[in-house]
Amino acid sequence: MKGLLLVAHGSRRAQSNEEVALVAKALKIRVHDQYAYTAHAFLELAEPSISQGIDALINQGVTHITILPYFLSAGRHVYEDVPEIVQSKQKLHPEVHITIAPYLGEASEIIDVLAAISNTTQ
Amino acid sequence: MKGLLLVAHGSRRAQSNEEVALVAKALKIRVHDQYAYTAHAFLELAEPSISQGIDALINQGVTHITILPYFLSAGRHVYEDVPEIVQSKQKLHPEVHITIAPYLGEASEIIDVLAAISNTTQ
């Protein structure tokens, strides 16, 4: 059984975190044929943490977890912090497959979205 | 004449800033029929600053500037910092029309991009 975990940075501002939860909810509807469970988690400043998010999916019976980094640029968070947390969880749960997907900003479709925004607001 | 300014947060990591420059270059090709000039700028930690980016567009003869916030969530940066800088530039250049477009994370198409990433990496 597959689970998807959208991982964002996390903010001191509750509304920003709530935005991430709403994105995860919308995504859940879009990918429910592929992923039995879709959830969100935060690297820092907010909960659920990545560790808590992974545990919750495993508790639901998920055996294959895809971590989707909701980040625009490949800084330390994408290259070091998220992988470190995921690796430590992977060691605790060797029976579960955990994969980190490319981060959002790496997707070429981002250019399409930016072009669409540009063309509607000039 | 129209100009587009992609505004990112800026990072201490040169590679992250270079990513933004590459996104702006790819976007430029996509919107060149609408915008004579497309450039990028950073809120902090890197140059060109938003102020410098706006000045550069004006120096090119741009009369209508669209600011496109390359941010995923509507925190203080999107709601306060970017608008404040833009407003102060607008006062200095009342003859130029400066508009702030919706920030990237607000675009519903982001869900499509996330779904595409999820479906190719499960």
Image: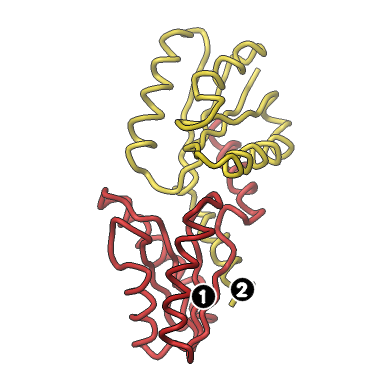
Chain colours: A yellow, B red
Characterize the local packing of mark 1: few (<14), some (14-19) or many (20 or more) Cα atoms within 10 angstroms: many
Q: Secondary structure at mark 1?
A: strand
Q: Nearer the viewer, residue B8 or B39?
A: B8
Numbered disc 2: what chain?
Answer: A
Q: Residue at x 49, y 19 (%)?
A: A51
Give x and y (percent) for residue A94: 46, 8
The image's mark for residue A90 is none
Marks 2/1 in contact by CB < 8 Å: the verdict is yes
Q: Residue at x 50, y 37 (%)?
A: A10
- Rendering quarter of residue B48: bottom left
- Rendering quarter of residue A62: top right
Characterize the local packing of mark 2: few (<14), some (14-19) or many (20 or more) Cα atoms within 10 angstroms: few
Q: In the figure, A57 relative to B54: above or below?
A: above
Give x and y (percent) for residue B55: 35, 81
Task: Decide if residue B86 is on the left or right side of residue A66.
Answer: left
Q: Nearer the viewer, residue A30 or A69?
A: A69
Check disc 2 and give the amino acid type. Thr
Q: Secondary structure at mark 2?
A: loop
Q: In the figure, B103 relative to A73: above or below?
A: below
Check disc 1 and give the amino acid type. Thr
Q: In the figure, B20 relative to B31: above or below?
A: above
Q: Nearer the viewer, residue A6 or B93?
A: B93
Q: Residue at x 38, y 82 (%)?
A: B57
Give x and y (percent) for residue A101: 48, 34
The image's mark for residue A121 is 2
The C terminus of chain B appears in which quarter of the rendering?
top right
Distance CA(mark 2)–CA(mark 1): 7 Å
Q: Nearer the viewer, residue B116 or B24?
A: B24
Q: In the figure, A110 relative to B48: above or below?
A: above
Give x and y (percent) for residue A63: 59, 14
User: Label 1: which residue?
Assistant: B66
Numbered disc 1: what chain?
Answer: B
